[in-house]
Amino acid sequence: MFVVHGLTRAEEYGAVRHAHPSSRRGWTRLGLQLSPAPPANLRCETLQSILPATATERLGRSFRIATGGAQLAFQRALRLVGRESRRMDPRIVDIYDSSGRLIRALVDSWGDLAGGIAVVVPPAWGRTKETLLPLAATMVECFRRNAQPISVFRFDGINKRGESFRPADCQPFGREHYRFTFSQGVEDIVAVVDHLQGNPGGPPARIVLVSFSASSIEARRVVATDLRIDGWVCVVGSADLQSMLKSISGGIDYALGAERGVRFGVQEILGVAVDMDLAGADALRHDLAYMSDAKQDMARIRVPITWISGRYDAWMDAGRVRDALSQGDTSRRKLIEVPTGHMLKSSREALGVFQLVAREISEICTGGPVPAATPSLAMLDRKRRGEVERLAPRAVNLRRFWEDYLLGRERKIGFELMTLTSAYRELMLGQIDELRLRDEGCVIDLGSGTGAFPFYLRRCRAELSGVRVIEVDFVREALRRARSRLGNAESLGFIEANLEGGPMSGVPVASGCADAVLASLVLSYVSDSRFILREIHRMLRPGGRVVVSSLRRDADMSKLFVDGAQELRERWRSELSDWGAGVELETATRAYLNEASRLLDLEEQGRFAFWDSAELAEMLCEESFEEVEVRGAFGDPPQAIVASASRGDRAS
């Protein structure tokens, strides 16, 4: 580090970011990053685990479930309690900003707001206030155990998805963020703080901001400028807007482009369509775009900050986070690295991080921790149903979604991009091993898409003779692409079938005809997963093998995408030239990422469901499958669960 004189009107501190040979002999071109203050020592804490893992939650290795085990019975009872009890209607608070526009919030609390601790939770990128119910419930339960009053306000932002104000032309689905700006997000947080300070019974004693993902940009500015904030806990947040947008857009530098007058128009980023000309100009005008802006804000902050960073979060740059946090007074700052990715909503790891958030809030406000506690699963289910069922269901054309996802919006390449990565190849090869195929057998591939299973089967099991593969999907165009890709071999059959359940659904094959059935990454996406399992049981011969896989709870696509995109760039024109004909790789990968992001949106709406290991194993056991084994797969750390079993003969 060194002091740079003469470059600006004030003395600034610079760090070398890039060094390149200069055209002048003996010279080197240096790229400097300037900041108003020298970096200081920062307290860093690395957690190897969040909560102690049980045998059924160690995704890195397989385990076997005994039918009717005590743990499964306990989980089943918890779910039944949640199903049978009536839903809990949420507490809704309407807040109005200085222009009279609505900000709708949900409030979770124990004790009075007046004189207690208030926690403000702005929405993460593309998410709504309902997403972080488990966070709010966990914090309330931890503070309740310690008899400390707490009120958690989670809200929808103006000009964002959710129930807060949007102009008429931004009401339709897909257009919610067209008027989005980060400066408006700053104003939203200030409006909520104004509401808390104006509480008729008296203001809270402390106000803490908890931000996730991209809302760290807005939260940072509020904490730097609003003296009513007593502390900030940032979870998987971005240090600066420029680097975040480059990461999640596949390398596009929107900030620099906007500064140089490039017109981007409406761009889709992680499934969220944004007018980047409007958002970019706004970020530049309010000094929210660059790392230098982040450092200026951090240098002004005097209240405690705890930043929780995911070790496997590929969207965020941990080095830049350290740089930003090192500006200003670091004596009350803490950086905690946890073994998670970017997605933290409802998984066991997420609940552990939420307990950590509660601990940090308590230490900021009282100087001591609260006991770790997990909210009742039954209560969470009741509250979730209360929050979701009060909202008007959103019409979704699932057939169109799956066509775009599998075939690509331009109908050139879609899901094949994922199937060409090493992470997916290892997933599929592992599933093929667990099918235990033999010569002259018949295997049914449910939700076959564009034919990844037979594509890999031919490469790893070429010695098998007479194996018949029946590809089953409800997207006709995907089956056509599979046929074109694989050829019309006699060993291949293609069936279009409705897998959704109901009187006109099912697979038109004879009972007991299959030696094995594969349902790879499909069970989560049907409306009745039990119907599919019963169909699999019907089609299998006694003792036949089944392999099903699903994305895990809070599956994180960041590392899968970043690693996969880099791998494809290196292989695209050499090994994958046949795939690359007429396809611009960067455009195709961004389009696929946006479609994959919609999987998470639809899961949040309740259309899809992801499970943990024990839940998936339990479903197989309850549908009369035996010798159930479960393991993690699809990336490092694993983002999917693979369960294998044999058909049992007990009555379903």
Image (tube, rainbow, N blue to C red):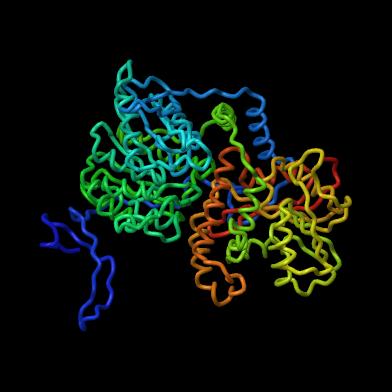
Residue 361 lies, with reference to residue 240, above or below; the image says above
Q: Position of residue 547 (x, y in %)?
A: 73, 55
Of residues 480 and 51, which is closer to you in this image?
480
Q: Is residue 188 visible?
A: yes
Residue 423 lies, with reference to residue 221, above or below; the image says below
Residue 158 relative to residue 453: left or right: left
Q: Residue furthest bottom?
A: 25
Quarter in which the C terminus is drawn: top right
Q: Position of residue 95 (x, y in %)?
A: 38, 25
Quarter in which the N terminus is drawn: bottom left
Q: Position of residue 361 (x, y in %)?
A: 35, 35
Residue 340 relative to residue 484: left or right: left
Q: Residue at position x 46%, y 55% from top?
A: 312
Of residues 607 and 547, which is closer to you in this image?
607
Q: Residue at position x 60%, y 33% from top?
A: 393
Numbered label tally:
0
Q: Is residue 373 visible?
A: no
Q: Position of residue 267 (x, y in %)?
A: 45, 52
Picture quadrant where residue 459 is located: bottom right
Of residues 475 and 429, which is closer to you in this image?
475
